[in-house]
Image: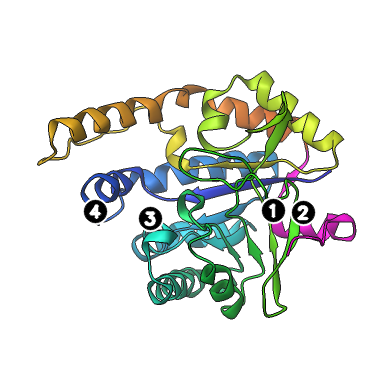
């Protein structure tokens, strides 16, 4: 079974300014260094993945985006800035996606036909978002986490890729994040903090379990999760409560980074991994077509 490898290409420092001060700053060169680190590993192992790229990354670092495309990876859009979908109007969302895709495609000459919302922020309050993606010709969405979480998640969503039908009859492929069922509930695995913080054997067992169900695992991570010594500048003007949250957030986000690459190398060496496009193409005949 072909599992899915995906990368959300964004900048940690810019995200801090946006999350804590609603302020946009230019992405840091660290984003380039960390993404190149992943490209080197994937090239060494001969593995391709889907890269969901922020428009601002393509604006400031077009050579990086060209290297991603030049190595044969599947291109996707992650928005222009790291804005949550449910905090945008439909017009703002459409403009951000159009602008980001144009930056990516102008830099590479390669179509970007996949989308992943930042923080999986397409939800019941944004029923227009998928219609806009269909309007713009996107074929794949990977914005659903099929479990009940504190900040995101849809526990009613299918756990395997499916055709997501829109009210007007159009559809696109939905590629949900990986969950396993244990003790009568769904548990998130295989991506981001779950990949970084969980012991390797848990993720390993999760991939085996998913494949036994006939479901390809979806690995996702951010390039900055490989940076062991980030140079984090304190933000000025924060209240004491915000400062406490800022320090806790940075502490939590750096736990487990020393093992991210070794876990990834192990998984990519043990199981078959590829892009969303290739996984859908390979398994299309057996995928669910029931989600309305």
Q: CA distance from mark 4 to mark 3?
A: 10 Å
Q: Nearer the viewer, mark 2 or mark 4?
A: 4
Q: CA distance from mark 2 to mark 3?
A: 27 Å
Dot placed on the residue nearer the N-terminal end, 4 or 3: 4
Q: Nearer the viewer, mark 1 or mark 3?
A: 3
The residue drawn where x is 52% and y is 37% is: 192
Residue 82's label in the rendered image is 3
* Element type at mark 4: loop
What crowding class fits label 2: few (fewer than 14 Cα within 10 Å), some (14-19), or many (20 or more)? Answer: some
The residue drawn where x is 71% and y is 72% is: 171
Q: Image check: 162 left or right of 15?
A: right
Q: Nearer the viewer, mark 2 or mark 3?
A: 3
How far across and how far down the image is residue 77, in percent? 51, 63
Which residue occupies the foreground of this view, 60 or 113?
A: 113
What crowding class fits label 1: few (fewer than 14 Cα within 10 Å), some (14-19), or many (20 or more)? Answer: many
The residue pinned by badge 1 equals 275
Label 4–label 3 contact, CB within 8 A? no
* Element type at mark 2: helix
Q: Check residue 122 for magenta coloring.
A: no
Quadrant in which the N terminus appears: top right
Label 2–label 1 contact, CB within 8 A? yes
The residue pinned by badge 4 equals 22
Q: Image check: 1 left or right of 34?
A: right
Q: Image check: 7 left or right of 245?
A: right
What's the magenta region?
272-292
Label 1–label 3 contact, CB within 8 A? no
Q: CA distance from mark 1 to mark 3?
A: 23 Å
């Amino acid at each position: 079974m072909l599992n899915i490898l995906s990368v959300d290409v964004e900048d940690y420092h810019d995200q801090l300014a946006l999350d804590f001060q609603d302020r946009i700053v230019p992405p840091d060169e660290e984003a380039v260094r960390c993404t190149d680190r992943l490209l080197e590993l994937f090239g060494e192992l001969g593995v391709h993945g889907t890269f969901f790229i922020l428009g601002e990354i393509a604006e400031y670092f077009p050579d990086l985006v060209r290297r991603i495309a030049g190595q044969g990876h599947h291109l996707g859009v992650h928005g222009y800035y790291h804005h949550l979908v449910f905090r945008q109007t439909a017009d703002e969302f459409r403009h951000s996606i159009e602008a980001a895709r144009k930056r990516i495609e102008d830099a590479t000459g390669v179509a970007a036909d996949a989308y992943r919302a930042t923080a999986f922020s397409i939800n019941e309050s944004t029923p227009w978002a998928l219609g806009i993606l269909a309007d713009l010709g996107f074929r794949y969405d990977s914005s659903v986490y099929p479990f009940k979480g504190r900040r995101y998640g849809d526990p009613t969503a299918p756990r395997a890729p499916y055709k997501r039908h829109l009210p007007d009859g159009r559809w696109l492929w939905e590629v949900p994040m990986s969950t396993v069922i244990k003790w009568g509930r769904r548990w998130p695995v295989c991506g981001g903090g779950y990949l970084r913080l969980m012991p390797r054997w848990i993720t390993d067992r999760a991939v085996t379990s998913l494949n036994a169900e006939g479901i390809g695992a979806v690995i996702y991570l951010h390039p900055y999760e490989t940076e062991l010594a980030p140079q984090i500048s304190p933000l000025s003007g924060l209240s004491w409560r915000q400062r406490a949250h800022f320090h806790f957030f940075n502490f939590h986000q750096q736990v487990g980074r020393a093992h991210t690459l070794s876990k990834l190398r192990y998984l990519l060496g043990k199981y078959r991994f590829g892009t969303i496009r290739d996984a859908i193409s390979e398994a299309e005949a057996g995928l669910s077509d029931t989600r309305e």
